Image (cartoon, rainbow, N blue to C red):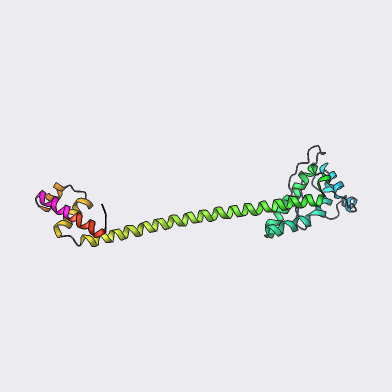
Amino acid sequence: MDTPPPAGRHRLPLRLVAAAGARPVNQPLPFGPGRTGRASHAGRSDLSEVMDEVAHGDKQAFSTLYDALAPMVFGIVVRVVRDRAQSEEVAQEVMIDLWRQAARYRPDHGSVTAWAATIAHRRAVDRVRSAQASADREQAQAAREHQTAFDEVSEQVETRLESEQVRRCMRGLTELQRQAVTLAYYRGLTYREVAEALRTPLPTIKTRMRDGLIRLRDCMGVTT
C-alpha cells in the first residue's frame, strides 16, 4: 500500500504492510483532493476511533489521521532537526510508523496526539544523533589524515636537519677522517677496503675513523 508524505508535498509511493490482524490492503492510499471517503471521517474528533480503523487497514481513516497529525508532527520534528528537508523526511517516516504501528496504540496509555508526538520526537532525536555521529566520524577521519600528513612532514624536516648537522660536523674532521668515515658509513666499505682505497695503513685508518667518530658524536650531541 502506498503511503503519503507530509501534507503539502507530492506523495511518494511507499509500500506499507498492514498491521497484524488487519484486513489486507493492496491499493494505494486515497490521498488527494476530491477522493471519496475523506468527508466520512472529516467530522470525527475522536482520533482513537480513527486509529482503530487504521489498525484494520482503512486507507480513508489513515487519510483523516494524516491530515490531523502531519502538521503537528512536522512542527515537532523541525524544531529538533532544524533542517527543513531532513525534517520532511523524518515526518514522512513518523507517519509511516503511525500506519505500521496503529495496532499497538492503546487509548488507556494516552491520546493519539500524544502518542504521535512521542514517536515524532524520538525519530527527530535519532536523526540528529545519527547526523552528529556521521559528522564526528568525518571530523575524526580528517584529523587522522591531518596528523599523518603532519607526521610525515615533521619526519622529513627532522631528517633534513640531521643531514645538515652531519654535514656541518663532517666539515670539522680532518681530510683523512672525513674520507674514511664517508667510505665506511656512506659507501659501506670495510676498514680494509677503506685503507686500500686511500692507500693508507690499516691501523692508521682504524685510528682516524675512531677519532673521527668521537668528534662527530660530540658535535652532534650524541650521548652513550
Q: Nearer the viewer, residue 106 or 181?
A: 106
Foreground of the two, 31 or 207: 207
- Residue at x 82%, y 54% (from the top left corner): 68
Residue 51 x, y percent position in the rendering = 83, 46
In this image, 78 relative to 135: left or right? Answer: right
What segment is highlighted magenta in the picture? 200-211
Q: Can residue 166 be seen in the rendering of this structure?
A: no
Relative placement, left or right, of 14 versus 217 is right
Q: Residue at x 75, y 51 (%)?
A: 118
In the rendered view, does 131 fall on the left or right side of 94?
left
Image coords of residue 66 (percent x, y): 80, 52
Where residue 44 appears, as percent x and y from the top left, is 89, 51
Number of residue marks: 0
Q: Main secondary structure of the magenta part?
A: helix
Q: Is residue 216 visible?
A: yes
Picture quarter with the N terminus: top right
Q: Is residue 57 above or below residue 150?
A: above
Q: Nearer the viewer, residue 192 or 2?
A: 192
State yes or no: residue 139 in magenta: no
At which x and y percent is residue 76? Answer: 74, 57
Q: Pick out the residue farthest to the front.
A: 224
